[in-house]
Image: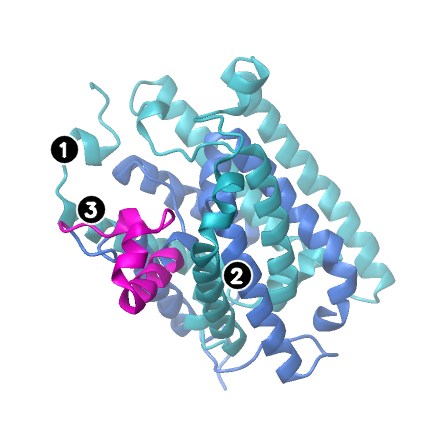
Amino acid sequence: MNEIAPLVLSTNMGHGAQMVIAVLVGVGFGFVLERAGFGRADNLASIFYGRDFRVMRVMFTAIVTAMLGLYFLDLFGVMALGNIGLLPTHLLPQLVGGLLLGAGFIIGGYCPGTSLVASMSGKVDGMVFVGGLLLGSVMFTVSYDWLAGFHASGDMGRMLLHEYFGLPSAVVVLAVTLFAAFALWGARRIEIIVRASAGLSKEVP
Amino acid sequence: MKQTRPLWNPYVAGVALGLVLLASFFVTGQGLGASGAAKRLGAVVLHHASPTWAEENGNIGKYFTPARSAMNSWIVFLALGVAVGGLAGSITSRRFKVETVRGPRVGRDVRLWLALAGGVVSGVAAQIARGCTSGQALSGGAQLALGSWVFMFSVFGGAYALAYFMRRQWI
């Protein structure tokens, strides 16, 4: 391979160095999540009541930023998309898992990554959520014989949106960028209406 | 008490998060993740209870090799970093505080039981979907993986569908 990245491949990085880098990346990830306000369940849950779309703003901006970076790096031959880890698509398990994760989010107030940040910010509910997460993981493993068929169903392998729809990748990259911009514009309109009817200040704190 | 630092502007935080994710891909060839660490920790607990059973389990058996401990993995070190980064962030912003976050209309005990229930559901869900908001929605979403986008819309769908029934907990 001629691309300079991912560095782990181009430099034949050893296991120890990779683990050190994983810690450093994690520190950046955890710090940004905290500064984004994701260490508190009430900040996270308010998106689901239309009062504060901060979560969506951060999430969509992050996805578009990383997507543009990835596709331009691929275009310029710096890093081939095919050389980075991609989870296989299993449509039905991802649909069901997504619905359940959304349910867990509104019931518990966190998702797995944010619950860890909340725990480290002293939030007791975050610590309890992490405990639940471990319990849920163990429950899945214990029931695996029974769930394995469903878990493996509908395997489509590595499947990207533009491959699925038969479009050039540039079209989908542009469409996703426009979709994110439109969604955030719409979210702001909803936020204004909901905040007015709830008697809150127009601007999100 | 001194004032807490304000949160970052959400678009600034979004660009920063996107750059962390991009840096992760650039250096390690992997995205971000969180639930995988819980899976491995749970696997180690089960292995302590019954090594043979755990090693033969279809979900976690592959983690137990003579070469390396099940916890000696990229996703576990990443989670360790997230914990350190979260702690550093909350201390430097003066937001570190031992408390139970809850809406004005819910008691502490109910809130904690719901946090436990939500955690359990999320633990199962992340396994079924092969990842959570970090590994699927963020990392897979940025790569434009079909399944990750289905997952992301499903997360919003599941949460909005139950939001009405959970309103007393949050607003």
User: At numbered mark 3, what does the secondary structure look like: helix, strand or loop?
Assistant: helix
Tell me if residue B7 comes above or below residue B102 in the rendering: above
Q: Are marks 3 and 1 in contact (CB under 8 Å)?
A: no
Judging by the rendered image, the residue that carries numbered circle 1 is: A11
Mark 2 vs 3, N-terminal side: 3
Q: Are marks 2 and 3 in contact (CB under 8 Å)?
A: no
* Amino acid tagged 2: Phe
Q: Position of residue A170 (x, y in %)?
A: 51, 17
Viewer-proximal residue among B19 and B76: B76
Mark 1 vs 2, N-terminal side: 1
Discs 3 and 1 share one subunit: yes
Residue under mark 2: which chain is it in?
A
Judging by the rendered image, the residue that carries numbered circle 3 is: A18
Specify the farthest residue to the right.
Answer: A197
Judging by the rendered image, the residue that carries numbered circle 2 is: A38
Q: CA distance from mark 3 to mark 1?
A: 11 Å
